[in-house]
């Protein structure tokens, strides 16, 4: 086993260990790292997890100091339990891994796909891709929802599916129905996805630490109620409730889809409350592993577990004392930890891991979720008593498609922000605003902001018009009377993609540069290859 190190001259070099589950994957990654030494993204220790002394080598790597460790399951769970304070990132299947599985289906055989929840953010693009590939059956289902998995596999069998792609949890149901099974396992695409997730997470963590060090009272809540754009009756009601609830000390539960601005609203409420001089701390309950979440919230004493700091560490409840603690994605909190949170809300004191001493706290809790917690309670995924402790004051942030009257004013506000950020002077054409108001925006304000930011960067002319959307959207509008340049815009984009491929750029790099999804790139290449063959 060799250790591969990549040293770089960028501003921040992270120390990352990658532990592979097999020798073939180790060899493939090793060869890739040798060819990309000029990218200088991180110092990487590559370890073959299939060798006999892998555990010893992982331990030495962690003891030498690692910002993060990337592993495949089930080793990831074992390492998270053994080193609870180490940042462990699990490699999960990517869109590329899923498409590679589909390509294994013999020609002429019907194929179905069980899409795991880990790919739910890519579902819209995946749906377009699967339709283009003429896949007749596909479902988005959690790997842990056995009832839903069993029902979906049975539906696939009734639909005449012969080969089914799915995660390990669906295998026994597929076999029982007499279908051929293709296991969806995280391979190369999953690793690339995990690696860039690690870089983003570590950078955000460093920035958060700097903000905390610069402010002895904790992290600052930057947003105020005026920063939340919206004049529709729905948003006026949201703002009215926020002003009323800010004067209270009770727990608040904010519900709404991803991208609607729940954390912005939480910060605005904090800044209107009597706690505005205190810290505002936030934790995404779905972004922290179960083994780390308890110590993150409640802290620990020195020697409480292997790898613990000698002096111990305070948790977020202590750090947020006198202020507000925002628990995002509360619906993803592990069931066992929900009992501890309930006790804190009842007793207003916490105990660090490894300690019997109770520490009184004065913290206001604002929780948020994009899930239906009432349904989760009925399905026994969320504690009923905790739900009613959290849902004292309720605010629902409506999705963008339910307040289309706000799309124009939100778009203009976002454009002003990005114009100032990038030194541009763009303006939105009325045809663009009208078209925006017809879209469903499943990613809500976040998706709209991403679209406008890409337009700000890509468009060279002052006025942004409807044909410009072909550069930044997977399914741009069709303009019957556009000029030849506009009619050939997709061909130009495809030629540009092929040129970047020839220059050695990865799919992720191309997608980032063009501001489109990776699945869109795959779809475009497939479409134009067929076109050339014809």
Image (tube, rainbow, N blue to C red):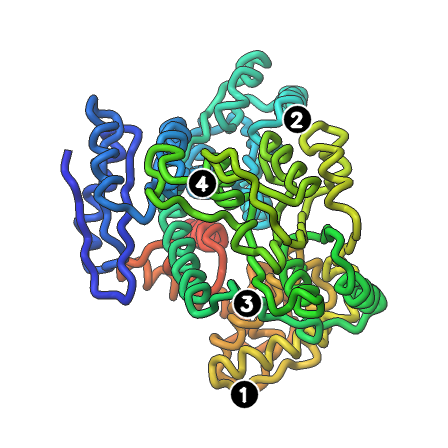
Say which residue appears at 55% left-offset and 67% top-offset: 220
Mark-to-mark CA distance, 1 and 4? 51 Å
The answer to whether mark 1 and mark 2 are in CB contact below 8 A is no
| Disc with the residue nearer the chain's start (2 vs 4) | 2
**Where, quadrant-wise, is the N terminus in this rendering?**
top left
Q: Is 132 on the left or on the right of 530, as rendered?
A: right
The residue that label 3 is drawn on is 220
Which type of secondary structure does the marked residue at label 1 adopt? loop
Inspect this view and state whether residue 55 appears. yes
| Disc with the residue nearer the chain's start (1 vs 4) | 4
Say which residue appears at 46% left-offset and 39% top-offset: 292
Query: In the image, residue 339 lies at what x, y percent?
Result: 64, 33
| Disc with the residue nearer the chain's start (3 vs 4) | 3
Q: Is residue 279 above or below residue 156?
A: below
| Disc with the residue nearer the chain's start (1 vs 3) | 3
Q: Is 181 in front, or is 122? A: 122
Inspect this view and state whether residue 403 appears. no
Name of the residue lying farthest toward the front: 357
Query: In the image, residue 120 lies at what x, y percent?
Result: 57, 43
Tell me the mark number nearer the camera, choosing from 2 and 3.
3
**Residue 304 in which image quadrant:** top left
The residue that label 1 is drawn on is 425
The label shown at residue 300 is: 4
User: Would you call the spot at circle 3 few (<14 residues within 10 Å), some (14-19), or many (20 or more)?
Assistant: some
**Residue 12 in which image quadrant:** bottom left
Query: In the image, residue 358 lies at what x, y percent?
Result: 56, 40
Q: Is 170 in front, or is 475? A: 170
Tell me the mark number nearer the camera, choosing from 1 and 3.
3
The residue that label 2 is drawn on is 148
Which type of secondary structure does the marked residue at label 2 adopt? helix
């Amino acid at each position: 086993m060799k250790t591969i190190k990549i040293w770089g001259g960028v501003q921040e070099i992270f120390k990352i260990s990658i532990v592979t589950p097999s020798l073939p994957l180790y060899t493939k990654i090793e060869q890739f790292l040798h060819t990309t030494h000029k990218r200088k993204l991180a110092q990487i220790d590559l370890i073959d997890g299939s060798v006999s002394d892998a555990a010893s080598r992982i331990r030495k790597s962690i003891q030498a100091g690692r910002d993060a460790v990337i592993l495949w399951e089930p080793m990831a769970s074992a390492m998270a339990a053994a080193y609870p304070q180490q940042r462990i990132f699990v490699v999960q299947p990517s869109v590329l891994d899923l498409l590679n599985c589909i390509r294994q289906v013999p020609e002429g055989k019907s194929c179905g796909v069980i899409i795991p929840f880990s790919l739910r953010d890519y579902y819209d693009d995946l749906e377009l891709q699967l339709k283009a590939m003429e896949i007749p059956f596909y479902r988005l289902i959690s790997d842990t929802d056995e009832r839903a998995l069993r029902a979906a596999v049975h539906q696939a069998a009734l639909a005449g599916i012969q080969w089914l792609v799915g995660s390990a949890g669906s295998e026994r149901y597929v076999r029982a129905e007499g279908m051929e099974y293709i296991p969806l396992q995280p391979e190369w695409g999953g690793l690339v996805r995990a690696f860039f997730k690690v870089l983003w997470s570590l950078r955000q963590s460093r920035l958060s630490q700097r903000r905390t060090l610069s402010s002895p009272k904790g992290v600052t809540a930057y947003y105020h109620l005026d920063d939340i754009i919206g004049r529709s009756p729905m948003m006026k009601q949201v703002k009215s409730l926020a002003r009323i609830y800010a004067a209270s000390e009770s727990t608040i539960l904010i519900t709404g889809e991803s991208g609607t601005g729940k954390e912005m609203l939480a910060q605005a409420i904090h800044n209107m409350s009597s706690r505005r001089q205190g810290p505002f701390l936030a934790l995404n309950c779905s972004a922290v592993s179960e083994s780390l979440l308890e110590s993150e919230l409640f802290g620990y004493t020195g020697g409480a577990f292997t790898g613990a700091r000698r002096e111990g560490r305070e948790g977020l409840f202590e750090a947020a004392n006198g202020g507000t603690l925002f628990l995002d994605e509360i619906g993803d909190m592990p069931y066992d930890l929900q009992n501890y949170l309930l006790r804190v809300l009842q007793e207003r004191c916490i105990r660090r891991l490894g300690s019997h001493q109770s520490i009184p706290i004065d913290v206001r809790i604002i929780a948020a979720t994009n899930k239906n917690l009432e349904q989760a309670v009925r399905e026994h995924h969320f504690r009923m008593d905790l739900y009613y402790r959290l849902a004292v004051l309720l605010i629902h942030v409506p999705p963008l498609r339910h307040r289309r009257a706000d799309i124009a004013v939100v778009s203009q506000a976002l454009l002003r922000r990005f114009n100032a950020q990038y030194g541009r002077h763009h303006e939105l054409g009325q045809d663009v605003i009208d078209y925006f108001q017809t879209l469903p925006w499943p990613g809500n304000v976040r998706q709209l902001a991403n679209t406008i930011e890409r337009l700000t960067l890509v468009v060279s002319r002052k006025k942004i018009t409807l044909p410009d959307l072909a550069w930044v959207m997977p399914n741009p509008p069709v303009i019957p009377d556009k000029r030849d340049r506009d009619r050939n815009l997709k061909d130009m984009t495809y030629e540009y993609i092929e040129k970047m491929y020839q220059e050695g750029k990865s799919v992720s790099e191309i997608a980032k540069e063009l501001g489109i999804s990776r699945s869109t790139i795959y779809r475009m290449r497939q479409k134009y290859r067929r076109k050339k063959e014809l």
